[in-house]
Image (cartoon, rainbow, N blue to C red):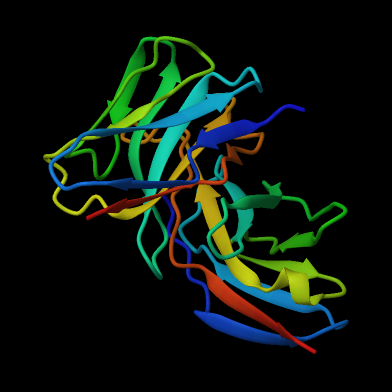
Amino acid sequence: DAKTTQPPSMDCAEGRAANLPCNHSTISGNEYVYWYRQIHSQGPQYIIHGLKNNETNEMASLIITEDRKSSTLILPHATLRDTAVYYCIVRAFNSNSGYALNFGKGTSLLVTP
Amino acid sequence: DGGITQSPKYLFRKEGQNVTLSCEQNLNHDAMYWYRQDPGQGLRLIYYSQIVNDFQKGDIAEGYSVSREKKESFPLTVTSAQKNPTAFYLCASSLVTLRTEAFFGQGTRLTVV
């Protein structure tokens, strides 16, 4: 599976856009970029995913570079409730793990008043 | 409402006892997964199943066992052979495709004393 690199922590002021970067330079053509977040002591929550094109939903936008080696998750107007650990995951089928998501350590986002 | 349910939310056991964690989904998903999370760490895959009556070991299967007798259910047993069973356990389910997201339960926090 392609590895991802995320900054360990970031801060964002409430009401501002939060831009969370992710590097995945070894991604293959059939591998998807998924973003999840986890609020303390809860199960991970799906945010968004994409293959090649930029994607937007009610929670966030996902910008994938043309070469697919990096992506950015954008929370357009961060609120205090967006404080969480954000995981960028490159998802592929693997003979050792099937379709399972392979979690790294993620980025701890702190939204401040 | 469709979803994935883990029970109980908190579980306490004495050292040396086996304990079974429940995971049920009504999403009609073929694939189900068990993860373990330790403080400050990402999720690690214990077992996964892509179809009824079949399951595969993940990265950290030692000391754990599972069954998949029904599509909706994927219970995890933490045996006395697991050396450090105290952790946060998460169950997930998905279709057997990369194109759609996996859904997570809210987790079971197991404490062994």
* Image: B1 above or below B106: above
Instruction: Tell me if residue B35 comes above or below residue A83 in the rendering.
Output: above
Q: Which percent across, then down, holds residue B113? A: 22, 55
Asked if residue A85 lies left or right of residue B34, the reply is right
Q: Quadrant of residue B20?
A: top left
**Image x and y of residue A12, in percent:** 73, 86
Left or right, B31 with respect to A97, comes to right
Q: Position of residue A101 (x, y in %)?
A: 48, 45
Q: How many marks?
A: 0
Residue placed at 48% from the left, 29% from the top? B23
Q: Residue at x 54, y 17 (%)?
A: B72
- Could you tell me which residue is drawn at 56 percent across and 76 percent down? A108
| Up-down relation of residue B100 to residue B12 (above or below) | above
Quadrant in the rendering for residue B2: top right
- Residue B8 versus residue B69: which sits nearer the camera? B8
| Left or right of A77 in this view: B25 | left
Residue A111, percent across and down? 72, 82
Residue sitting at x 63%, y 69%: A84
